[in-house]
Amino acid sequence: MKQFSFEYTNTTMLAADLGRVSNLAKSRDIKNIWIQVYVTEEQGECFIPIRDTIDLCLPGAKYVITHAGKTFSGGELSQSSAMVVCNLFEDPSTKLELKQYPFSEESCESSIDEIIEYVNANPWIKLISFNAGNDLSSARYMNRLAESINPDIKMTGGAAVTFELSVTASLFSSDGPLSTSALVMTYIGGENFHARTDVIVGWKPIGKEFTVTKTEGPTLYELDGIPAFELYKKYLKIASKPGMIVNQTIEFPLCYEDDGALFLRCPAALNEDDSIVMMFNDLCVGQKIRLSFGSPDVILDDIAAKLNDIATFEPQVISINSCFGRALFWGDALKSELIGYKKICSSSGYLTGGELLRTGNRIKIFNETMVTTAMREGDKTPDGSGIHTVERSESSYALTQRLATFIDTITSDLEEYTQTVKRMATTDSLTGLYNRRIIEEIIESIAKDNKAFSIIMLDADNFKQINDSCGHKEGDKVLCLLADSIRQIIADTGLEIYASRWGGDEFLLVCVSDKKDDAIHFAETLQSHYHSKDAYPNVARTISVGIAFTKPGENLDAVFQRADERLYSAKGNGKACIVS
């Protein structure tokens, strides 16, 4: 497999470049040519001239022409209005097809049906490279495609983008017209064709977790119940100025983890109410997110490590979809993260409006990420001579990374300490059940909501005898065993029951139900379960239970008193019984 890249200046020069490709293809009897054209000129005035030149010089070639933020080839950034990348498949067994589909909200479902049918009818397909319009809202339909085809097929793609927000990015192909919402699918495969896809992020999570509490459409409204931008004001001292904020937040995007992968989500604009308009927002209520940070040294080290891993695949060509957000981060130094590809093999790519990759049976959308597709025809070299590695920096580990590790460790320690303190404040240290204060608060809350409930009071029979004859440690074991039984039966019955250690060997439970029999059934089941445990010699393992069901308008103290009286009645009736 060979790749040739040309910077577009005019049709005359392009015709000369494509003529040389045509001569090479004819001399080697190459039938399959895949051309990727990345256009950075916003108005797309070169779209048609480039198309016509390709059709003239390489009739029958498959091509896709798309808007791009920037383009690059061989580790070098291009300054021209367009980059033309020609991929030549030399192995005669390699197959190549390209199809363009309408992909608006109205046509997504039918297009996906058509794609699924085509892919399943052509088992030679190993890689699907796709180009999409800049509206990724329809990308969710792609999950059905991923679920319906061979799980071994690699899928990767990018969204068209322009840096001029007033211009809608477009694309088209050898199979269809210019469109802002088309989906161009390039199918590649064959007996000797191999591909691998990879994700390179480089940003690292930092600090505590936050919970998404309000989000809708592209807007993230609240984290932990407060305006989302408060996070940036509090922890990063970024001023609240409504308008575009991407340049202030690009180093510290939000992030979350899913299936072991890190996903970055970058704020684009700030609203008057401190809500944030995201570049792409797939966050949902209840989701856990964190801040992340980008350090050039750490990013470059991650890239070098990933490239050396990719190098073991011995690729002949690497195609790169990189987020235009990375260009905002790097500025004039963007070349720094691309130069390493030059040492591996021929490479090219563009800055996208979103990077897409198949992970399992889903298509995931990335931000501020590089998604790469490494391709090879034929087997790897038996002696590994085809592996070309990238040197990793020997400089000291980035100070920012060490600070981030320190902050992460401190945050983790504080969160663990907070959880410990919370656990100590809410639970009984011996049994792990709620303590008396918390169960009282729970009951008060249930009563305020006008829910029907029962109070269940119980204790371990003959507990004093066990303490006196076997020691307090054995007595503690009895209480823990009874607590374990309570937890087990709560889980088994599925009832809404809250359990606490009331004091000594007494336990108090609240069963939220308008059926008296639920509390009685629970007590009977618990009694049977606890009784089945191994007993101490000459000591029966039983419990006595008193149950009081709430009456409309009844004072809580009266309910507690009735439950307590019925417990003592059970003890007076010979123990090992339930009084309700």
Image (cartoon, grey):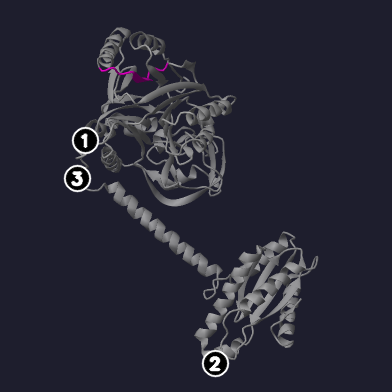
Which residue is the site of mark 2?
469
Q: Earlier in the sequence, mark 3 or mark 1?
A: 1
Q: Does the magenta stretch include residue 39?
A: yes
How many marks are shown on the rendered structure?
3
Residue 415 drawn above or below residue 233: below
Closer to the camera in the image, 503 or 373: 373
> Residue 183: image x %, image y %?
48, 24
Task: State which mark lies toward you, 3 or 1.
Answer: 1
SS category of the residue bearing label 3: loop
Q: Do residues under tags 2 and 3 come within 8 Å of each other at their CB atoms?
A: no
Q: Which of marks 2 and 1 is nearer the N terminus?
A: 1
Label 2, label 3: how many angstroms apart (C-alpha)? 69 Å
- Would you say residue 413 is visible in this rendering? yes
Which numbered tag is attached to residue 386?
A: 1
Quarter of the rendering containing residue 452: bottom right
- Would you say residue 265 is visible in this rendering? no
> Residue 138: image x %, image y %?
53, 30
Q: The N terminus appears in which quarter of the rendering?
A: top left
Residue 153 drawn above or below residue 89: below
What are the residue bounds of the magenta stretch? 28-42
Three-letter residue code for mark 1: Gly
Which residue is the site of mark 3?
394
